[in-house]
Image (spheres, rainbow, N blue to C red):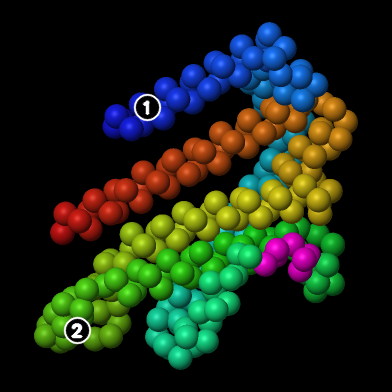
Amino acid sequence: MRRAGWIRLAVIAVAIALLEVACRLRWIDPVSVIPPSKMALGAWKLLASGEYTHDMLLTIENVAMAFGIALVLGFAGGVLLHRVPRLRRAADPLLASYYAVPTFIFYPLFIVLLGLNRWPLVAIGVMFAMVAMALNTLNGFERVPAALHKTARAMGLSPVQETFLITLPACAPYIFTGAKLAVVYAFIAVIAGEFVLAGAGFGFKIAFAYNNFDNPTMYGLMLILLLVVGFVNWALTAWERHLHERTAGR
């Protein structure tokens, strides 16, 4: 691990220790926040009981489906914007202001179109994630050096060969960055939707525990969620760094 990583871990450890002391000494209202040690104990009990396993798996499945669909649609959209400059100029204002629009307002429409099931949440996750994927795909295609395209033409490569042997490897790190952001946005959209729109899932159970003043369960679920999302983000970041290093090495 690099020095910056150790510094981050030290800062997190100090923050957790300070929060533990503040909660134990009642500098913070125990009704609002419980000590991190009790959060960890609550998370362990939840995992050991298996009571919330179905809800956790349901959320992960929804996120995975939203991510998969957003990956395909976002990649196709980025390629289309790159190939059709006129379409890109027309879409620029929409893309610039896309995340200023609350996507949850479309939930009633999705219920009418898709039914009262998991698919409206998946659709919200797709809407939230696919634009990040499309923008990074577009950025990656635009950053392919012109010299590589000239080399492909000089070697007599077909368009398909140029795409798979030259273009995609050159813009892979940027596409992967889009995929990493799509995962994060899918998690945000699905879990936020479960808070207010669903009858099951990670977000629903956290909101239910909050409404019933069940702090150990609420903070335990939040801790599990943070660890899952943190691990996924750490793994994707490490892979992304590896791709960038390989590209820089060539």
Depth order, front residue of 234/142: 142
The N terminus: image quadrant: top left
| Callout 2: SS | loop
Q: Does residue 72 appear in this view? A: no
**Placement of 222 over or under 159, stated as above or below:** above
**Residue matched to label 1:** 7
Q: Are marks 1 and 2 in contact (CB under 8 Å)?
A: no
Q: Does residue 88 appear in this view? A: yes
Residue visible at 75% across and 30% down in the picture: 218
Task: Please state the horizontal and vertical placement of residue 235, each as a whole percent of the image.
Answer: 42, 42
- Residue 68 placement, left or right of 44: left
Residue visible at 41% across and 69% down in the picture: 137
- Is 206 included in the stretch rendered in magenta? no
Q: Residue furthest top?
A: 25
Say few, some or many: other residues with alpha carbon within 10 Å of mark 2 (under 14 / 14 to 19 / 20 or more).
some
Q: Nearer the viewer, mark 1 or mark 2?
A: 1
Where is residue 223, by image quadrant? Answer: top right
Residue visible at 16% across and 77% down in the picture: 147
Magenta stretch: give its range.
101-107
Say few, some or many: other residues with alpha carbon within 10 Å of mark 1 (under 14 / 14 to 19 / 20 or more).
few
Residue visible at 82% across and 33% down in the picture: 209
Q: Amino acid at mark 2?
A: Leu
- Residue 226 placement, left or right of 107: left
Depth order, front residue of 30/246: 30
**Placement of 156 over or under 31, stated as above or below:** below
- Residue 181 placement, left or right of 197: left
**Residue matched to label 2:** 157
Task: Please state the horizontal and vertical placement of residue 250, each as a whole percent of the image.
Answer: 15, 59
Task: Please state the horizontal and vertical placement of residue 13, each as a whole percent of the image.
Answer: 48, 21
